[in-house]
Image (tube, rainbow, N blue to C red):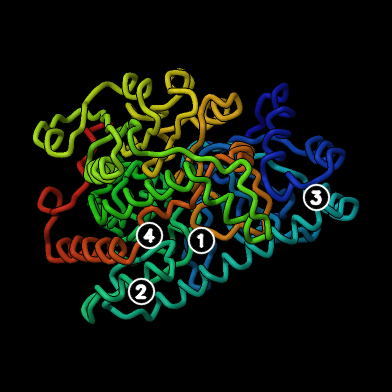
Amino acid sequence: MLVAMNQSSDSQQLRACLEHTAPFSASAPATLERLVERSSLRSIAAGEPAFVEGDPSLWVFVVLRGSLAATARAEDGRDVSLRTLSVGDLGGLTALDATATRSASLRAIEDATLAIVEKRAVREALESDSSFATALVAYLGEHIRSKTRQIATAVARVGRDPREQIAFFDAKPYERAAFERRLSDGLRARWIEAKLDASSAAMADGYPVVCAFVNDTLDATVIERIAAGGTCMIALRCAGYNNVDLAAAERHGIDVARVPAYSPHAVAEHAVALLLTLTRKTHRAYARVREGNFSLHGLVGFDLHGRTAGVIGLGKIGRCAAELLRGFGMRVLASDPTPDDAFDARVGVERCSVDALLERSDVVTLHAPLTPDTWHLLDARRFALMKRGAVLINTSRGGLVDTRALIDALKSQHLGAAGLDVYEEESEYFFRDRSDKVITDDVLARLMTFNNVLVTSHQAFLTEDALDNIAETTVANVREWLDGRRGEALTHRVARAPSGG
């Protein structure tokens, strides 16, 4: 049942919610205030219904906390699962007519909180605020396109080829071409354009294997949903797995495998490409010449030869980067918890602490994994340690860098330049064409205003060689699993989380 919350804090929470939820965020200030006045917060206990199919549809709602399952009654009387709604999801906008009824039931999977807005207030806002009306039309258009894709996938699933064992989420054309070269007649995939998250997890129903990428969501809610649909393996087509709740996978008996290495040279070479572009300002020179401006003013760079590079993380990619930088005649410092005297002697690498590396390096390149210990490895304190005018390169994980602290270091001109192929909140933007939309992430938008910052869209891995290696290893992982290998028997399994962790 719906239970009213403490009214004293409702207004502030509701305003913050609507300000950050499309299409309400596009409304005029006066419209937003009227919507807040005619809204309220409601809590729903786990297992309890929020709305029941056939009830009058009186509210639009936004999920503020928890998750809820939407179901509809089929003609044969069975309840059919439609989707899972999680924090930030919006419902009720497709039935704004005053006489509309609920087309589905909504039940809390866990304790949840909804922000509910009177539909009459929404209709009035549509009539009086053109900005809100335009945003609502755009939102509904995207909603319809998303639902069309889901329906097409569901229809195709009914009569699917029995060789289709893999639900391949967030499929891109360049990935599909590489994978189809590795898949044989005995094993095929269903290519799904949508990212994997709580709203799309139902599209994996009936598939024993889900293939996901680093920006897909594999939290406890999603894992519970795909497990309920029959998925027993997650085949990651990437090296990182910080987006996977391994404890939840353990609880639901789902094996997780990854691609620990595909082409370390591809990522290391991209890091050097970013570095050379920034140090020689070729991105600015290219833009100038295209406009007929052949001036050299402001394009003075510096030699890499004879300067000091700091490599944080000496895994396969970090080692490739160290060798490339040594090839430019740079002194190379490195920080990594695992010693390797033979490699250091062969390449000419000096080991030191992260702080000492930052103090001495003209260039710092990050190649460390993202763990609780490395989250915001570069924060305000460590940016202050860096040499004035130093260049930062990050082709590893966005969460290694505190982006707000990075912006402060750039604004103060303490940091000379930054080349970023990753960003800590990249999942909403990277790998997608957002050129027709406003960037609402204020931190990302500010970062992109600097002419000494180069951002690429997580493309360091994107070479023909790397894509083929990723496809080869991922398909081999799936074949191992389908052949009966489980748990530790999988060659590239991801280590399980500790029990209860």
What amino acid is labelled 3 in the image?
Answer: Val
Give the number of marks.
4
Q: Which callout, 4 or 1, points at the residue further toward the start of the chain? A: 1
Residue drawn at (39%, 33%) of the image: 363
Q: Residue 282: percent from the left, percent from the top?
A: 52, 51
What amino acid is labelled 1 in the image?
Answer: Leu
Q: Residue 126: percent from the left, percent from the top?
A: 84, 54
Report which residue position mark 2 lands on.
177
Residue drawn at (65%, 48%) of the image: 439
Residue drawn at (23%, 50%) of the image: 260
- Distance in Å between CA atoms under marks 2 and 4: 13 Å
Front label number (1 vs 3) = 3
Residue 122: mark in rendering: 3
- Distance in Å between CA atoms under marks 4 and 1: 35 Å
Q: Which callout, 1 or 3, points at the residue further toward the start of the chain? A: 1
Tell me the SS state at disc 3.
Answer: helix
What amino acid is labelled 4 in the image?
Answer: Leu
